Amino acid sequence: MKIHRPALFLLLTNNLSSGVSQEPPACIAFSSFEFEFDGECSYEEVLEAFRPIFEDPINSGKDCTNTAEQELQVLLKAKDSEEAKTALHAICNDAFQSYPNVFNFADIAKKGGNFEQLFYNGGTDWNEEYQTEYPTDAAGNPTNVLKADANRVKLIYNTEAQYGLIEHPDSLTNFDQCSTNAIMCCWPKD
């Protein structure tokens, strides 16, 4: 997952130590900084993304004795890695909850009603439709054109899904046991 700049800015701006004496003291002397990374918003991923920033002597200074992990823990005001993981988990949740542009899942298809539930149960025209030249409408145009009938899916994929968040469809019973909050569709016939 790409964590966007505002989320990581919150992560490090809101959690930098502010003149509080800590053991070991922070080596990074900036009042705030930001970085981006691709991956899960987890302690391990953030630590790996933070490591090259910390290891740059311009950022940490030549006299720093902290490791990258110790420095991240100091910045998170944590006593150990478990406390840092807990703090980072809360920060990631806050960043996702406060993300300004969350796209409504039901707006992908814009079919209304319980279309999404029926779709994931396999009971909509999108599940059964085959691309054919027949039947045709009154003007002689094919009526079963998958590219046109579900065109919003590709549109949303190329826009909202690439640059923002799409809400998890909590109302769909198909995903009640989904601990990763990730959804994928597979069509073996197409």
Image: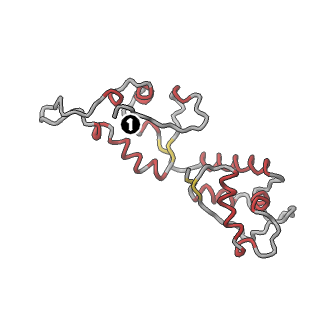
Q: Position of residue 107 (x, y in %)?
A: 41, 39
Above or below 131: residue 45: below
Q: Between 178 and 34, which is closer to the camera in this rendering?
A: 178
Q: On the image, which quarter does residue 140 sit in? A: top left
Q: Look at 54% across and 39% down and name the residue there.
A: 182
Question: Is disc 1 placed on a helix, strand or loop?
Answer: loop
- Describe residue 60's horizontal placement relative to residue 140 as left or right: right
Residue found at the far left of this picture: 139
Q: Position of residue 181 (x, y in %)?
A: 57, 37
Q: Look at 75% across and 69% down and name the residue there.
A: 28
Query: Which residue has dot 1 on it?
Result: 109
Above or below 117: residue 146: below
Q: Position of residue 35 (x, y in %)?
A: 62, 63
Q: Between 14 and 88, which is closer to the camera in this rendering?
A: 88
Q: Position of residue 149 (x, y in %)?
A: 29, 36
Circle 1: is it few (<14), some (14-19), or many (20+) Cα within 10 Å?
Answer: some
